[in-house]
Image: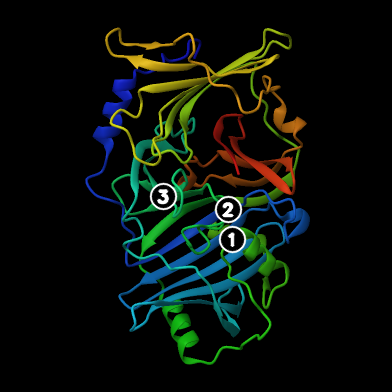
Amino acid sequence: MTVPDPIPAGPDLDADQHKSKPGSLPQLPAAWTATVLLSPFGDSVSPLGENGSQLVAGIIECSSGEIESWMRVVLYLTQDQRCYEFVFMTVDRADGDEDRYWYWVDAGPDGSIRGTYGPFLTTLRVPDASFFAKAIWGNSYPLMCTDTNKNGIECDHWLLPSPGPPGRGSWYAFRKHTPQLFRVLMLDSTNPLMLPILGSYFIANLPTFTQGVSDATKFRIKGIKTKRAKGRRHFWNPMVTQQDIQRAMASPLAWADCTPNDIERVIPGFTAVQSGAGLPSWSDNTYARGWSIGADPVPYFTRVCYIWTGDAASKQQSVFIGVGAALSPPDHPYSIRTDICLNTAGTTQPSYKWDSATRTWKHGDDDCIPPEISVGVPHPDWLKRERASIMGQIRGNPQFGLAADEKLNLIAAQAPRGGGELAIFWVWFLENGVGMLFSEG
């Protein structure tokens, strides 16, 4: 593409968002099974030490009933090659309150069981059909667009507000016109919605999601309820946050070795990698178009134009169209546009409003937003400069939008923020250099 697509009109984006809204809120099935690939938040003091940013593969089976709900989770550390199994339960009491607890299952990747520890108290709640009752419509757009799958995987995106002050929430993508949850993006590492496992990590991808649970898992739950589990008087872990889970994994009550083949059975085509070799670079002329999301109730239409000349003429323009209103979507959410313009001297942020009379984006003399941090235009090899690592590679998995010969590299670039805070930029690139996802956790 030699000329970027024109910047779209605000009313056109408004109309598309309104037209694509489903007729009802998303709803989880009463029983479901999913495979997951979990990308962690940054944590400079991770209990897992230098492998704290490793990807986690897993299988989740969940059943919700009027009185009792449960979730069985089997997780695989892709670098350490260890397997862990947990069961979470929520039980309604006669007084209207709930009992919430979890068990640690001593089991192997083949499903064999040696014992169970618990129950341990938690504030986690197994999700039921009403979990998305307060969801706010975001927009409809595809994920996982590739050269061979240009239309990607069409998804509906919903924001679920967090309890407490406005302006916080988490995002859930469903395959369009289906109850198949496809991706969860958490913007708060404290897991405010108390969602087991899926709420503890930064990004949870669910390549497969089917209704029902296995007979083996039903038998496992029945055994846990009828047989006496082993108690641990001085063990306490609520398993709410990512650090809780990693702390449990670092000092486990039980675990089992697993193999790369065990992990690949969960995520076909996955290979664990921890290498800085083969990192992609931006081209000197890069154009990207997609959607950016935060805690605002609509995703921002995004367009990026990047020119690298190696001198003061290097520049980048990132266009973001969309406006948030304290988690209450305005009537015209795409009436505001903010640009982030980077050059070798720093950052400027002009703002625009849609003018219906002239059908143009109008910029006033005072319509500039002071940047929180003034940064310059990035180098094309910024991933190498940030000492990023390829943490995993997926080949030929159609659930990630890949053709048989396509490879997707899952890259982590760590950025220390000071004060014990560590950001991780998760960047997904096809092996041919096409970018798929850019995020900071």
Residue 39 spot, x, y in % from top left: 59, 50
Density class for disc 3 (Cα within 10 Å; few <14, some 14-19, many ≥20) is many
Horizontal side of 217 relative to 273 (left or right) equals: left
**Residue in the foreground of this view, choosing between 221 and 377:** 377
The residue shown at (43%, 50%) is 182
Tell me whether circle 3 and circle 2 mark residues in contact (CB < 8 Å): no
- Kindly identify which residue carries mark 2: 189
The correct choice, above or below, for 79 with respect to 4 in the image is below
Residue 166 spot, x, y in % from top left: 44, 45
Q: Distance between the residues labelled 2 and 1?
A: 7 Å
- Kindly identify which residue carries mark 1: 241
- Label 3 secondary element: strand
The residue shown at (65%, 27%) is 373
Q: Earlier in the sequence, mark 3 or mark 2?
A: 3
The correct choice, above or below, for 42 with respect to 222 in the image is above
Q: Which of marks 2 and 1 is nearer the N terminus?
A: 2
Question: Three-letter amino acid code at disc 1?
Answer: Thr
- Kindly identify which residue carries mark 3: 161
Density class for disc 2 (Cα within 10 Å; few <14, some 14-19, many ≥20) is some
* Furthest residue toward left: 23
Is residue 306 in view from this perspective? no
Question: Three-letter amino acid code at disc 3?
Answer: Pro
Tell me whether circle 2 and circle 1 mark residues in contact (CB < 8 Å): yes
